[in-house]
Image: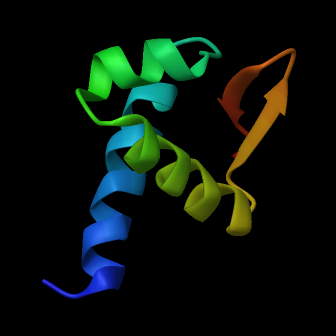
Amino acid sequence: MDSNEYFGSKAGAVWGVLNNNKPMNIAQIKKLTKMKSEHVFGALGWLAREGKVGISKNKFYLTD
């Protein structure tokens, strides 16, 4: 698996929990995805770069 596949799969998992729930903070995303903090931050960065996630009051949400 190359790095794009690896980080893309992490971003997909985070996108999935945000798509099925209300805005969430990092702890909530970690709990639902069962991912380490650094993977959640990487996934959120990936999604932010693509313009698919926003943040308000320390909670993340999908912009699509």
Left or right: 56 in relation to 12: right
Left or right: 39 in relation to 64: left
Image quadrant in which you'd find residue 53: top right
Is residue 20 visible in the rendered image? The answer is no
Is residue 22 visible in the rendered image? The answer is yes
Residue under the image location 59 percent in, 11 percent down? 22
Q: Position of residue 3 (x, y in %)?
A: 31, 82
Residue under the image location 36 percent in, 67 percent down? 7
Work out which residue is located at the far left of the displayed protein and give it: 1
Work out which residue is located at the far right of the displayed protein and give it: 57
Image quadrant in which you'd find residue 57: top right
- In the image, residue 20 sits, relative to residue 40, either above or below, namely above
Work out which residue is located at the far bottom of the displayed protein and give it: 2
Q: Position of residue 64 (x, y in %)?
A: 69, 46
Q: Please name whichever residue, 37 or 4, is drawn nearer the observer in this view of the structure.
A: 37
Count every numbered label the image shows and give the total.
Answer: 0
- In the image, residue 11 sits, relative to residue 5, either above or below, namely above
Residue under the image location 78 percent in, 39 percent down? 54
Q: Position of residue 45 (x, y in %)?
A: 63, 57
Q: Please name whichever residue, 14 or 22, is drawn nearer the observer in this view of the structure.
A: 14
Q: What colouring style does the render use?
A: rainbow
- In the image, residue 43 sits, relative to residue 61, either above or below, namely below
Q: Quadrant of the N terminus?
A: bottom left
